[in-house]
Image: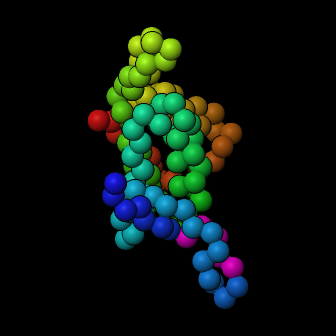
Amino acid sequence: MAERIGRPVLFGKQGAERVAFEIDAVHDELGVLVEAEAGRGARGNAVYRDLLRSSLIAGAGYLALGVMQDYRHRSAGTAIAVSSCRKAKDLLDAVYDSGRLRLPFEGVLLFRD
């Protein structure tokens, strides 16, 4: 597994980093954060977590969020397919279209496998 990158969220005394979150990739000059999820994106609310946590990172201007098109798994012997990309898009549409939750991003890019 690739090493995750820590980025500051909250600062304490004399500007020392007090809270930091880890992300998959970053372009500091442009303020672009990248998070990529596999099956957990569909089944473990990882997209919610990524959206909230990345919005708290200092200097975050953009989020690139990667998910699987579909996630297939078995539950009690039954094959189940979850449309990860559609669920993530629906979440982003709900956040931005409702206007009830204001995120600090100038833009969010949703990409799929």
| In the image: residue 113, left or right of residue 12 | left
The answer to whether residue 96 shows anywhere in this view is no
Quadrant that contains the N terminus: bottom left
The chief SS type of the magenta part is: strand
| In the image: residue 88, left or right of residue 19 | left
| In the image: residue 111, left or right of residue 12 | left
Q: Picture coordinates of residue 98 (x, y %)? A: 63, 33
Q: Picture coordinates of residue 87 (x, y %)? A: 49, 27
In front: 10, or 63?
10
Q: Picture coordinates of residue 5 (x, y %)? A: 42, 65
Range of the magenta residues?
8-12
Instruction: Give the quarter of the image for residue 34.
Output: bottom left
The answer to whether residue 90 shows anywhere in this view is yes
Q: Name the residue located 58 percent from the left edge and 31 percent from the top edge.
A: 94
Q: Is residue 68 magenta?
A: no
| Residue at the left extreme, as displayed | 113
Instruction: Give the quarter of the image for residue 65.
Output: top left
Q: Name the residue located 48 percent from the left edge and 67 percent from the top edge.
A: 6
Instruction: Give the quarter of the image for residue 66.
Output: top left
| In the image: residue 34, left or right of residue 11 | left
Q: Name the residue located 56 percent from the left edge and 36 percent from the top edge.
A: 45
Q: Picture coordinates of residue 48 (x, y %)? A: 57, 41
**Quick check: 103 above or below 45?**
below
Q: Name the residue located 45 percent from the left edge and 58 percent from the top edge.
A: 23
In front: 87, or 100?
87
**Quick check: 52 above or below 110?**
below
Quadrant that contains the C terminus: top left
**Quick check: 86 above or below 110?**
above
